[in-house]
Each structure stands twice: as structure tokens, then as C-alpha cells.
Image: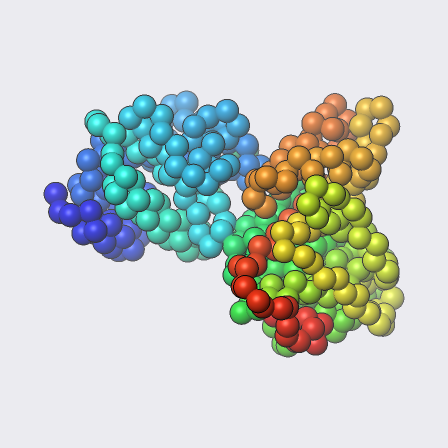
Amino acid sequence: MGSISEGVHAVRQAMQAAPPYAVAEALRDAVTLHFAVERVEVLLADPALVTLRPVLEEYAPGARGLAIDGTPAGRTFASQTPQREGTLLHLPVSACGERVGVLSLSFGTPPGTEAVEDLQEIATALGHILCDAYRITDRYHRVRRAARLTLAAEMQWALLPGCGHQGDGYRLAGQLEPAYAVYGDNFDWACGPRGLILSVTDGMGAGVEAAMLTTLTITALRNARRSGAGLEEQAGLADEAIYSQYGGRLHVSTLLMSFDAETGEAALVDAGSPRLLLMRGSQVRHIELEQQLPLGMFGNTAYTEQHLRLEPGDRLIVASDGVYSSRSQGGTEFGGSSLESLIKSTRMQPADEAVRTMIRGLLDFRRGMEVLDDAVVVCLDWTPDPKPGSKPSGPHPGRERP
């Protein structure tokens, strides 16, 4: 057995050299060769973030996965910290702030601190390699799914940039519900050297028609964004594209935001119904924006930015109407005190776990009710590094894209 640093290098090389569909096997073989590991399993989170599903035992009888809630491996996924379970060690697998799953390792004798650190480095490398492999092989998509996705949901998940991202000075996460049957709601983001651009969309209709409408919307927004357009122009060009296709018959409620992670300034265009909430300290309030026409309603709409400045530690929540308009069996609307209390309960959680908590809270609230609308929740935390004596500076995000 070589030194630990040599072991890390060898395992990385083995994963990188393996075909995309055999990365987990390459990891298992290399880890057991270079470390005192007796058994390896790679667990991937399902789209609903309810279970962790095994890759190496995917064809074994009864390989149904582990619940995220109430298991050591699930606690590793939720907290993104290693957890020990006797001679088992669970390590978080992530890439650029997006939670992918868990690497579970079994030892004859508990590993030392240095070995755990090296194995965590391997787990992180695995996260990046798996994210690349998703584009080339279907194996990991099949493993993750506890049920078949509807065609509309397949279209929507293929549009996503991911479900989480950690940038310089901020953390971002989003989730769709129902994960296996979502049709009109979606989100998109793009990071840059200063911050990010974000959109949350809520398309009309149901099934494939709603998914096609959202696909057109997000593609039009990306096309405008990648051509250098600012938020107002992005909204205008998407408005034209949707109207040209549907003639005003269908439209899309959208919130567009450009966020400067150096200054905490945000530029926003509210074209419809997604709701924006701010948690500052222990207080939650609804940010009232000038609501402008949904995209695609008339095709020649001029959109105007509004501006908001965040303070360090602020959390922004964007929720579609499938969240705040949901009702309980007693007729109470979720978007009032119930949603605010739930957001407050996430105060000590990172953005990705806060989103999972909010979705679970929504499901508990409307338990027993027919689901009439899908839902999306996106969470942005501004966590700038403190710089003694420094003051926020720089151009307004509405004047320069992040």
C-alpha cells in the first residue's frame, strides 16, 4: 500500500480513466487497493431528495436505497459533513456546492483523521466526475429514480443547470415538486466572476404543453443572456419569442434577477407571479415588486428593472404560485404565516437543506389534498467574506452583467 497522498492520486486517475458508466467500479477497485477499505458503496440522491439509491448494488434484490431522513448516510447528505456508523464512514459527494450523494466505506478498524481527509478529497473528485458522466451515460439517471418520470418532468429536469451551486460569496439551491411529475415550473441560473443571473418560471397549462412552453421560455432567456443582453432586454426578447409561437394564448410568469455578490445589489424584473421573500436575521418579509405583464402576453412589452440591496447573511426565497397558493384541507393558504414560519425554521440550515425543508413542509401542509399545481422553490444566501474597513462598491448590477 502506498502513502495516502499517492492513494488519492491513484484513485483519481482510476476514475478519470474509466468509461463514464464504470466510474463507481473504478473507484471501488482503486479505493480497496490503496486504502484499508473493505466495502464501498456510492449512494445517489433521488430527484425528490427522499432517498439515497445504491450504484454498485443497483441490480441486487431489494436494493431500494436509504431514507435521507433518519439515517447516518442521510445525515451526511443533509449536513454535508462526514458521519461514522460503527466501522462505516459516510462522506458527502458534491460538486461546486451541488449535493450529489454519499460515499459509504466499510473498514475493519476505524480510519484515522488523515485517512478521512484524503477519502473526503476522493469523494469530492467523484462528485465532479459523476456530474460530467451524467451528460454521457444514462446509468446514473436510472439509478437515481425511485419511479418513472413523466415526459413533461423529463423535459423539465433536462433544462435545469443543477439543483445547487456555491459561488464566491453566495450559495444557491432550488427544487421542483412533484419531482417525478413536474410540468410548468422551472428555474435557471448562470454564474459569473461577480455573481449570477437567475430566473424562476411558472408556465401555463399542464403536461407536455406546459413543459414545451417553459422550454421555449428558458431557451429564449438563455439565448438573450448569452448574447450579452441585460435583464430588461432578456425579458423583452423572451416575450416576443413566446408571443410569436403562441399569439398570446399562453404566457409565462417569470422572475428575473441579476445579483452582484460583491456589493449585495440585485436588479429584478417581476413578470408575473413568482413571489420573493427576504429573511434578515429572524424576520421574514415579502418583497413587494412592481408586477409587470407575464412573458408572451402581448409580444411588445417593455420591461423595467427594480433594485434591492441585500445585507450580509440575508436569505432570498423565490416561490412559485404552486407554493404560496397551496391550500390545506381546512382551506388555509400556505403563502401566509405558514410559509413565513417554515422559512424561519430554516435559519440555521444551508440553502440546499433549507429548500428541502420547505418542500417537505409544503407536502405536509397539503397532505390529503389533490395537487393542482406544481411548485418551485429557490434559495439564495449572501455570505460575503468580511473585509475589515471595506465598503461595498462597484457598478450597479443592472448596468453590468455579473
The residue under the point 36% across, 25% down is 85
In the picture provided, is 142 more to the left or to the right than 151?
left
The residue under the point 47% across, 32% down is 75
266 or 132: which is nearer to us? 266
Q: Quadrant of the C terminus?
A: bottom right
User: How many numbered marks appear?
Assistant: 0
As drawn, which residue projects farthest toward the front?
389
In the picture provided, is 110 more to the left or to the right than 133?
left
> Quick check: 161 above or below 87?
below
Q: Position of residue 324 (x, y in %)?
A: 79, 41
Q: Tell me if residue 183 can be seen.
A: no
Q: Quadrant of the N terminus?
A: top left
The residue under the point 37% across, 34% down is 90
In the picture provided, is 74 more to the left or to the right than 153?
left
The residue under the point 58% across, 37% down is 48
Q: Position of residue 193 (x, y in %)?
A: 53, 69
Q: Position of residue 178 (x, y in %)?
A: 66, 38
> Quick check: 180 above or below 157?
above
Q: Tell me if residue 351 can be seen.
A: yes
Q: Quadrant of residue 24?
A: top left
361 or 342: which is nearer to us? 342
